[in-house]
Amino acid sequence: MADLDLENPEHLCELLRRCLPGFDDETAARVGGHVEALERSDNDIFGLVGSGRRGSAAPVEPTPAADQAGDLPLDMGGAGQLLEDPLLDSGDGGVELARVPVLARRGWTELDRVAAKGRHVVYALEAKHVRRKPIRAGFTADCQSVRVRLPLAKPAKDAFIGTWIGTVEAKDHLAFSVEQVADYYERACADRPSLARVDLITGARFRGRRFSPVSIYLAYRSNDADAKPCFYLLEGGSASGNPEAMYVSRSIETGIKSKAKFEFTPFACRNNWYDGGLEMSPDLREPACVHLKIAQTRDGRREYLRVSVTYSPVRELRRVLHPFEQQIEAGLRVLAIADEAGCQLKVGAGGVLQHSLGPMVSSMIPWDEQPSGSPTALERDTFCGCPKK
């Protein structure tokens, strides 16, 4: 592949399969249905995609007409069991969500999604990555998450909660109920918490795709309006949207130190250590930042990467950030870093794709710090994935 065409499904499929774990079964046919998302994106990385068809205004999510209902596809949450949040009169002219979701069987169409706008808190996420080994590199990426309330008991496997930015689905999470969150806490802390509520803040599945490297579970002992969370869980996910690992905090003030348990990029190792946690807003109502230091040893020696994700509630919702945009951006950044570091990508990776396109990709996308460095063979063996024995 001498050139990378971001409008070519074959090229995009190969990029994902070679650069990111979890895409081994990706196909050009599936990718092809999402190329339009890159054309519609306001991310500068995709500024040349569909350049002849782009308008000058920033993209805005369209509102379909009611008579289009029969022509619109299900938003891939579809035939599952909807955990519907019925709206209640809050007494001041507004609405609030009922405390206990009601199970309802129905499909989830584009009209349902648009109608859900404003029913859930949506967050703009700014994820900052600072890499120091085996080369230096830094970048900031944008994501979106939505806040939903989980049912008390474990729901059906095909259960989902419909929101404007997509469906929050049981199959995309290691825990999807208050009981399951209590189970995780009990296994980690040898103490069974009495919980009344759990809020999940996570990336949704949109058009069948999902990108949510971190999800937050906030646990509450009370349903009172002024209740504060008593502890939290962080869930790590792959770039393909699969849930991979759960990390438990003992209290809302406590940090997390744990083995990674999975590999988000080819540079990672499941035996690496995460040291960090969640910072809440001063009133403990909103997440403020998830921060992690990533090292190869428990004591923090051989630290090579720091990640911080800030959360800001969004009041004016213009459009959904398509997970496909974020997956392709992640693949491009892995490609550029691998080339500069001299890291061989995994399983069928590297070769023409990596070495001919790495420099071009590095120069075409924005960085906080351009990838740079001249690692030794020992540094490559140490930091390009799991250390070589």
Image (tube, helix red, strand yellow):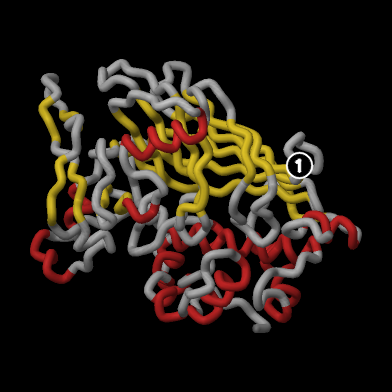
147 vs 327: above or below: above
Could you say where residue 246 lies in the image, as x and y percent from the top left? Answer: 50, 43
Q: Residue at x 84, y 59 (%)?
A: 389
219 vs 173: above or below: above
Type of amino acid at the residue the image marks with label 1: Thr
Could you say where residue 283 lies in the image, as x and y percent from the top left? Answer: 42, 16
Label 1 crowding class (10 Å Cα cut-off): few <14, some 14-19, many 20+?
some
Q: Residue at x 10, y 59 (%)?
A: 66
Could you say where residue 385 lies in the image, as x and y percent from the top left? Answer: 72, 59
The quadrant of the rendering that contains the N terminus is bottom right
Residue 188, can we see it? yes
Q: Quadrant of residue 350?
A: bottom right
Q: Nearer the viewer, residue 146 or 349?
A: 349
386 vs 190: above or below: below
Q: Quadrant of residue 337?
A: bottom right
Residue 162, can we see it? no
Provide the secondary structure element on which disc 1 rests: loop
